[in-house]
Image (spheres, helix red, strand yellow):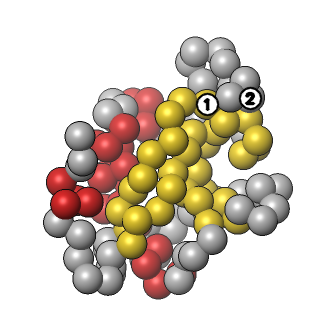
Amino acid sequence: EIPQDEIELGANDKIIQAFHFTKEPLRAHGIPFKFVLKTGEPFSVTKSRLQLRIGMNEKDFIKVKVAIIHVASYAKPQYIEDNNIILSDYGLTNELLGLDHVDKTGRAGRV
């Protein structure tokens, strides 16, 4: 199944890889997925689309911290805290979008 935002990809929109992790990017869990960064979209709207995409309820999603992960280092996530920033302005090319939250299955890091 292809999400609607991928089907209706705008000329300047970009698809980025996203994944779940707990505290540090090497402790990945869940299923990685592709996500569309819409040109000019404020992060508050991007977060709402992320929540919808992963199907997490509001109460649990509040605890999720979204970060930009640099593929080369995986060391220090750059957490996004400003709801007004526009991710498409960052020119992300070799980065991932990380969702830092507790793995309720207890299998974090056993990927």
Identify the residue at horizontal 31%, vertical 43% (top origin): 53
Residue 48 location, x and y as percent?
Answer: 31, 52
**Quadrant housing residue 61:** top left
Query: Is residue 66 visible from the viewing direction of this image?
Result: no
Q: Does residue 77 appear left or right of residue 81 in this picture?
A: right
The quadrant in which residue 46 appears is bottom left
Q: Is residue 29 visible?
A: yes
Residue 66 position in % (x across, y down): 55, 53
Image quarter of the N terminus: top left
Residue at left offset 42%, top offset 53%: 34
- The type of residue carrying mark 1 is His
Residue 32 placement (x, y as % from top left): 51, 41
Q: Residue 109 — which label?
A: 2
- The answer to the question of whether label 2 and label 1 lie on touching residues, with beta carbons closer than 8 A, is yes
**Marker disc for residue 47:** none
Circle number at residue 29: 1
From the viewer's perspective, tell me whether residue 53 is left or right of residue 69: left
Q: Along the line of sight, which residue is nearer the eye, 49 or 5? A: 5
Question: Which residue is located at x 61 percent, y 31 percent?
Answer: 29
Q: Name the side, left or right, on which 26 lies relative to 69.
A: right
> Judging from the image, what secondary structure is the residue with disc 1 in?
strand
